[in-house]
Image (spheres, rainbow, N blue to C red):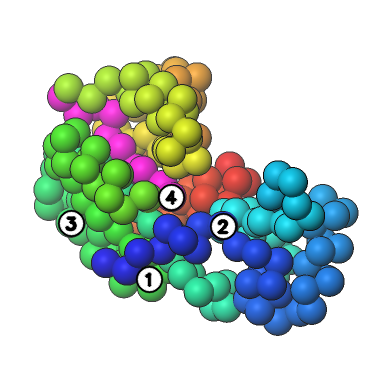
Amino acid sequence: MPNDRAKDVLTTGQVAKVCKVAPRTVAKWFDSGQLRGYRIPGSKDRRIPLNQLVRFMQAHGIPLEGLETGHIRVLILDEEHEFATLLRDTLNAEGRYVVDIATTIFEAGVLTQNNRPHVIVADVSMPGLQSRRLCQFLRTSEEFQGIKLIAVSGALTQGQGAAQLQNGFDACLPKPFEVRQLTKVIDEVASGTA
């Protein structure tokens, strides 16, 4: 799998190339607060996280094809291997996602460390999965706190969904769901509009 991690944060020059505008236009978007990012300490250099750029491009109708990675990295954590494989193959076929699957919590940890997913879709009814601890770990880890979390489960009532959101999940989706419902939620959480 290609290493996309270096492209998770872009310079104004890289953003200008992706959006096909002048770097000063990107600087204006940044300075006006339309395009979120941060400045390098002790410097005037601006940096734009990929998820903020995707959100900005979607909001302004700028085609995503110009992105060098162009892919949202997704990890599906589900003990039902056939279901997870079907989801992976369907999402990968869309061409916008790079999807890994894990059927155990250990496997999910290894894949998270190695591939740095943007979004984790986790079946919260999986035996041994403590959703509150998962959220606490990711939210307090400097390395992983930017990962978005989507809770899925066949036993996800409205009250349980609310509890998962309180635990720190970014979105919930009861099973069964259609793939287009999942892609909509993935896109929303990845771009910060959920």
Q: Residue at x 85, y 55 (%)?
A: 31
Q: Is residue 51 left or right of residue 121?
A: right
Residue 30 can be seen, yes or no: yes
Residue at mark 1: 94
Q: Amino acid at mark 2?
A: Val
Return the mark for residue 9.
2
Answer few, some or many: residues within 10 Å of disc 1's Cα (few below 14, many 20 plus, some between 14 and 19): few
* Tag in front: 4 or 2: 2
Q: Residue at x 25, y 59 (%)?
A: 88
Answer few, some or many: residues within 10 Å of disc 2's Cα (few below 14, many 20 plus, some between 14 and 19): some
Real-space Cα distance between discs 1 and 4?
A: 17 Å
Sequence order check, earlier mark of 1 and 4: 1
Q: Residue at x 65, y 64 (%)?
A: 11
Q: Which residues are magenta?
A: 118-127
Q: Amino acid at mark 1?
A: Glu
Sequence order check, earlier mark of 1 and 2: 2
Residue at mark 3: 85
Q: Quadrant of the C terminus?
A: top right
Residue at mark 4: 118
Return the mark for residue 2.
none
Across and down, in percent, residue 39 comes to 72, 49
* Tag in front: 3 or 2: 2
Q: Are marks 4 and 2 in contact (CB under 8 Å)?
A: no
